[in-house]
Image (spheres, rainbow, N blue to C red):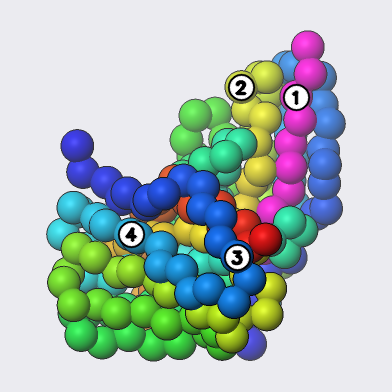
Amino acid sequence: GNSVTQMEGPVTLSEEAFLTINCTYTATGYPSLFWYVQYPGEGLQLLLKATKADDKGSNKGFEATYRKETTSFHLEKGSVQVSDSAVYFCALSFTGGGNKLTFGTGTQLKVEL
Amino acid sequence: DGGITQSPKYLFRKEGQNVTLSCEQNLNHDAMYWYRQDPGQGLRLIYYSQIVNDFQKGDIAEGYSVSREKKESFPLTVTSAQKNPTAFYLCASSDDLGGMNNEQFFGPGTRLTVL
């Protein structure tokens, strides 16, 4: 079956540090890939997505590139802020068939001054 | 504003009681989903529905039931058969057009605590 593996957290960084959160997937075929963000006590918000190999998703300074050869979709940001503190989820889905999402376990990011 | 609403935000129930969680969307989306979130386990799919009057089991459907009588509503009932119902429940919706625009939009969640 399909699965998503994320690096475990929490990840603690100082403000303006570089962020990488690793995400790899196992799937039959070529899924769409997503990063969702969850702020404390809230639902999930889509951060960025990529629908085919070599696509780069970007939003709010975050980027992730769909790497078919390494089945990866690592999340990066050049300079994190305290307001980026949240839980980040990597996920995949296939077009059609209900568009069901398969999530990783989430990575908590804490950014300190 | 278009979006997904879930109510209530916090819900407390005694063990052995059924409880129904509300989910409403005004995005005109065909597909709706229920997920359960537990610490350290990410989100797991309970049920989903691609069209009115039809729904399918997800990965952890045991002890739950749903209905989809209206396009905008997808209530989830947590029955007494669910062995560990205390969790954060998230509802989502999406266009299910078979194309590449398969983003899911999430509600704010309901935290259920069974005492």
Span colored in magenta: A102-113
Which residue does the numbered mark 1 point to in the structure image? A111
Which residue does the numbered mark 4 point to in the structure image? B23
- Image coordinates of residue B78 in percent, x first then y, are 50, 74
- Nearer the observer, disc 2 or disc 4? 4
Tags 1 and 2 touching, CB below 8 Å: yes
The tag earlier along the polypeptide, 1 or 2, is: 2
Question: For the residue labelled by badge 3, is the local secondary structure a helix, a strand or a loop?
Answer: loop
Q: Chain of mark 1?
A: A
Can residue A102 be seen here? The reply is: no
- Image coordinates of residue A10 in percent, x first then y, are 82, 42
Same chain for the residues under marks 1 and 4 in the image? no
- Nearer the observer, disc 1 or disc 4? 4
Q: Amino acid at mark 2?
A: Ser
Q: CA distance from mark 1 to mark 3?
A: 38 Å
- Nearer the observer, disc 3 or disc 4? 3
Which residue does the numbered mark 2 point to in the structure image? A83
Same chain for the residues under marks 1 and 2 in the image? yes
Q: Residue at x 73, y 48 (%)?
A: A107
